[in-house]
């Protein structure tokens, strides 16, 4: 159904409607033409019938006049005129029979002919006498009594009946013509009504499917132009508008991502340019402080002073590690891969945090550590990343807690799981964010997790964080390995 809600569907509807209008107009015109032609012919036929009946009637009475003229006025030409009028009457009857169509018309005309024949026989008998042969005393009796009172009355009734029949037919014809005119008007106005309906429908359709959605889309474009790329144009209207709105929304999303990437790159570039300078300016005084502390920390000092110098040296070393982590976070783009055993890489990172493990009286359990996994890594970068993740697990774990390190082989990759018994993260780490993130540590830099994300990405691996069902957090480092490497599933 949605496919019909489009400009193409509207064009199809209009095309079909136009053809329908043409068909209605053509059929209506044809019907009107045929009906008009038929009505015209019928009117002409009925008019001819009426006219012929009237002519016949007139000829009959003129014949009677000629009879009177012949016997009363002794007109010599009356006989010839009588015969001519008789011939014309016969022709009129032939005409009437020829153009009669209905049974009623034929019966009426035949009845008229029969009545006429009766009159004609009597008149012909009277005309058979020579002029002046009928005595004057018998002329009136013969014409008035026998002819006029009997036969002519019957003929007149036949004429009236025939005329009435034809007049009724003429009335029906006039009614039919009126109906035809009404039908023609309907057929004339029907295409107009359909066209008006189509116009209103098109206006409503265009207003709802294009005009209003286009106005809303222009408003959205103004918002996009003002920099509000998070706005989404409402997807509404016809299919073509939906495609346009989705394309513009996708474009806005792409622009938003591109803008965020540009901002991120600019921040990274600024940090990349600033941090080495800052690190260089900090390292020099830190080196001097550390050297002074080492030289000054001699054996004959009291315990409290020696501890103070040791704290200074530890603090300087910690600051140096932070600076190194920051530099490695910003510029790890050229890793140096070497073949190594993954377990050894993890063990090297563990060796640096034994004091912290002992300090919190933690226990570290290793699963599936006996079968070596050969892998290609930048060991320095990966050790730092794993070091930071394990340090986070140590800091999150309660005193005398337990940290589980599990190694699992899944087809063409190896996974390192780091499970702690802490309270979990108060934020959700995201792989896309390579900027320093939030930290829950008093002295934390917020670089550990983003740095680990970036190192895993450089190794074409992944890093995930999830809340454990019972307590604590599970961190999973997934890295690709050679297909021949095998390790039991744990």
Image (cartoon, grey):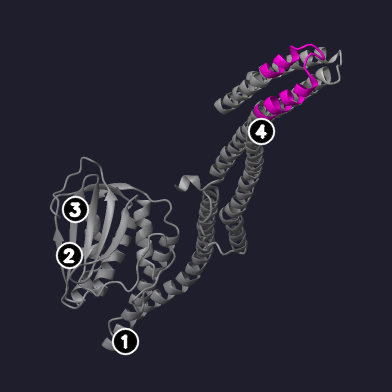
The structure residue drawn at horizontal position 77% and vertical position 13%, both measured from the top left corner, is 83
Relative side of 260 to 363, left or right: right
Is residue 269 something one can see in this rendering? yes
Give residue 54's position: percent from left, percent from top: 73, 28
Q: Secondary structure at mark 2?
A: strand
Q: Nearer the viewer, mark 2 or mark 4?
A: 4
- Magenta segment boundaries in residue numbering: 121-150
**Residue that badge 4 annotates:** 160
Tell me, for residue 305, which label it has, or none.
Answer: 1
Tell me, for residue 408, which label it has, or none.
Answer: 3
Q: Nearer the viewer, mark 4 or mark 3?
A: 4
Relative side of 411 to 131, left or right: left
Is residue 205 located in the magenta-colored stretch of the structure?
A: no
Is residue 302 something one can see in this rendering? no
Per the model, the C-alpha gap separating discs 1 and 4 is 154 Å
Q: Residues within 10 Å of mark 2 (few under 14, many from 20)?
A: some
Q: Secondary structure at mark 4?
A: helix
- Tell which of 264 and 234 is nearer to you: 234
**Residue that badge 2 annotates:** 404
Is residue 136 located in the magenta-colored stretch of the structure?
A: yes
The structure residue drawn at horizontal position 59% and vertical position 51%, both measured from the top left corner, is 201
Q: Secondary structure at mark 3?
A: strand
Q: Is residue 376 above or below residue 258?
A: above
Give residue 53's position: percent from left, percent from top: 70, 26
Relative side of 479 to 102, left or right: left
Per the model, the C-alpha gap separating discs 2 and 4 is 127 Å
Give residue 76's position: percent from left, percent from top: 86, 13
* Dominant secondary structure, magenta: helix
Per the model, the C-alpha gap separating discs 1 and 3 is 49 Å
- Tell which of 9 and 148 is nearer to you: 148
């Amino acid at each position: 159904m949605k496919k019909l809600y489009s400009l193409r569907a509207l064009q199809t509807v209009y095309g079909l409607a136009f053809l329908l209008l043409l068909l209605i107009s053509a059929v209506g015109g044809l019907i009107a033409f045929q009906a008009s032609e038929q009505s015209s012919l019928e009117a002409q036929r009925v008019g001819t019938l009426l006219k012929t009946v009237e002519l016949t009637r007139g000829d009959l009475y003129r014949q009677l006049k000629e009879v009177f003229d012949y016997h009363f006025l002794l007109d010599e030409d009356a006989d010839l005129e009588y015969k001519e009028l008789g011939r014309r009457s016969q022709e009129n009857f032939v005409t009437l029979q020829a153009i009669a169509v209905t049974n009623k018309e034929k019966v009426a005309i035949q009845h008229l002919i029969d009545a006429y024949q009766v009159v004609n026989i009597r008149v012909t008998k009277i005309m058979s006498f020579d002029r002046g042969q009928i005595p004057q005393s018998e002329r009136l009796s013969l014409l008035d009594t026998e002819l006029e009172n009997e036969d002519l009355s019957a003929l007149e009734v036949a004429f009236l009946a025939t005329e009435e029949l034809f007049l009724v037919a003429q009335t029906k014809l006039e009614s039919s013509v009126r109906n035809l005119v009404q039908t023609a008007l309907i057929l004339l106005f029907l295409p107009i009504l359909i066209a008006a309906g189509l116009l209103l429908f098109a206006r409503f359709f265009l207003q709802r499917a294009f005009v209003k959605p286009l106005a809303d889309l222009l408003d959205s474009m103004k918002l996009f132009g003002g920099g509000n790329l998070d706005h989404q144009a409402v997807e509404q209207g016809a299919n073509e508008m939906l495609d346009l709105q989705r394309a513009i929304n996708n474009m806005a999303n792409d622009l938003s991502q591109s803008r965020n990437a540009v901002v991120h790159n600019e921040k990274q570039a600024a940090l990349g340019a600033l941090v080495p300078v800052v690190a260089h300016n900090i390292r020099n005084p830190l080196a001097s402080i550390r050297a002074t502390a080492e030289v000054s920390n001699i054996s004959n000092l009291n315990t409290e002073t020696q501890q103070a110098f040791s704290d200074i040296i530890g603090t300087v070393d910690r600051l140096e590690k932070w600076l190194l982590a920051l530099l490695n976070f910003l510029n790890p783009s050229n890793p140096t891969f070497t073949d190594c055993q993954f377990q050894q890489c993890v063990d090297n990172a563990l060796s640096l945090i034994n004091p912290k493990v002992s300090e919190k009286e933690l226990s570290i359990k290793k699963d599936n550590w006996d079968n070596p996994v050969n892998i290609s890594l930048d060991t320095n970068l990966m050790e730092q990343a794993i070091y930071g993740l394990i340090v986070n697990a140590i800091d999150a774990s309660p005193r005398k807690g337990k940290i589980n390190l599990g190694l699992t082989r899944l087809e063409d990759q190896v996974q390192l799981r780091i499970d702690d018994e802490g309270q979990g993260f108060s934020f959700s780490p995201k792989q896309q964010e390579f900027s320093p993130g939030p930290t829950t540590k008093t002295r934390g830099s917020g670089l550990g997790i983003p740095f680990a994300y970036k190192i895993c990405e450089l190794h074409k691996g992944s890093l995930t964080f999830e809340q454990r069902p019972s307590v604590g957090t599970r961190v999973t480092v997934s890295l690709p390995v050679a297909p021949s490497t095998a390790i039991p599933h744990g």
